[in-house]
Image (cartoon, rainbow, N blue to C red):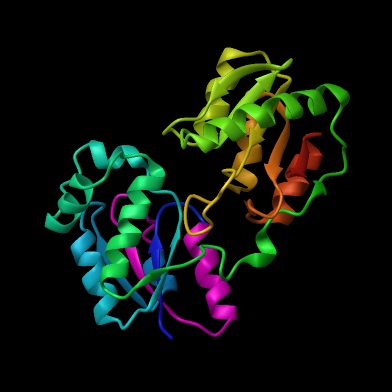
């Protein structure tokens, strides 16, 4: 069976390629011109560069490569679709038929188009199960009572915005919501919170209540902790079993060195 990868930005696509290699699989990669790091040409054997609106070209590439199952890995900023991207005919038809243009609808539409050509969109963590966050405290320091109160407060709100497909992350201080994620992404949300409040921030990042593991899976890693340090955040709660933790050893080492606590919650 031939597997394919739709690669967005960041390290996620490279970890999928590494996981696939360990499993003895070679992936056909559709790299997004506006997002994917150029070094993917050096890692993957078969790469096609497509614009964010070139759905027809991407599907043709996968069909010609004999791909039957595809994963999505790496963020593709949704604002790209509304900021100068030129969609091809197939993308235009898909967009025209969408009831709304939030994350689930957009990616669900792409999944439906792939399926028309006999290509199944599968779990993006298919080759990465060992990278999913465990339940409990991952760091040396346990969360304080105040941080636990912030997590409890934040989980309800974050789960609700995730259910509404608005974002996955909120930042809390003293049981008050400082920043809510929209299209900008987790790191930008944390940065904004740091400008609005003076430290002592708790980050709550959640999977959706009915998280579709094929796309938009929550991801954290060392850059998340680096952003927290700059913003004055001391704690982050992530959804156990549904959040990918990249470069876990380096992330936890950095968190421990800065007395930040990382907690896997349900």
Q: Does the magenta stretch include residue 19?
A: yes
Q: Quadrant of residue 239?
A: top right
Is residue 138 visible from the viewing direction of this image?
no
Is residue 103 visible from the viewing direction of this image?
yes
Against 121, is 177 above or below? above
Q: In which quarter of the image is residue 174?
A: top right
Q: Residue at 55% of width from left, 85% of height from top? A: 24
User: Which percent across, then down, holds residue 219?
Assistant: 58, 49
Q: Residue at 68% of width from left, 32% of height from top? A: 155
User: Which percent across, then down, holds residue 201?
Assistant: 70, 23
Against 44, is 222 above or below? above
What span is in magenta?
12-39
Against 181, is 141 above or below? below
Q: Is residue 23 magenta?
A: yes
Q: Residue at 87% of width from left, 37% of height from top? A: 142
- Residue placed most toward the observer, 71 or 40: 71
User: Which percent across, then down, holds residue 203?
Assistant: 66, 31
- Report the side of 135 relative to 217 (left or right): right
């Amino acid at each position: 069976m031939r597997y394919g990868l739709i690669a967005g930005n960041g390290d996620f696509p490279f970890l999928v390629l590494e996981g696939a290699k360990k499993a003895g699989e070679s992936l056909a990669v559709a790299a997004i011109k506006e997002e994917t790091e150029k070094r993917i040409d050096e890692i993957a054997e078969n790469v096609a560069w497509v614009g964010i609106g070139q759905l027809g070209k991407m599907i043709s590439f996968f069909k010609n490569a004999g791909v039957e199952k595809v994963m999505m890995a790496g963020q593709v900023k949704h604002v790209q679709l509304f900021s100068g991207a030129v969609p091809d005919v197939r993308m235009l038809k898909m967009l025209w038929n969408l009831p709304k243009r939030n994350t689930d609808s957009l990616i669900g539409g792409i999944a439906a188009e792939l399926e028309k050509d006999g290509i199944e969109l599968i779990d993006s963590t298919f080759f990465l199960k060992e990278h999913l966050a465990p339940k409990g405290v991952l760091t040396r320091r346990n969360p304080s009572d105040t941080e636990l109160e912030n997590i409890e407060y934040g989980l309800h709100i974050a789960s609700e915005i995730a259910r509404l497909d608005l974002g996955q992350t909120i930042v809390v201080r003293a049981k008050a919501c400082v920043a809510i994620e929209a299209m900008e992404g987790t790191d930008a949300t944390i940065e904004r919170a740091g400008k609005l409040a003076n430290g002592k921030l708790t980050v709550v990042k959640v999977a959706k209540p009915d998280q579709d593991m094929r796309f938009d899976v929550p991801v954290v890693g060392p850059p998340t902790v680096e952003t927290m340090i700059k913003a004055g955040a001391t704690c982050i709660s992530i959804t156990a079993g549904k959040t990918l933790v990249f470069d876990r050893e380096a992330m936890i080492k950095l968190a421990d060195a800065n007395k930040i606590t990382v907690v896997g919650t349900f």
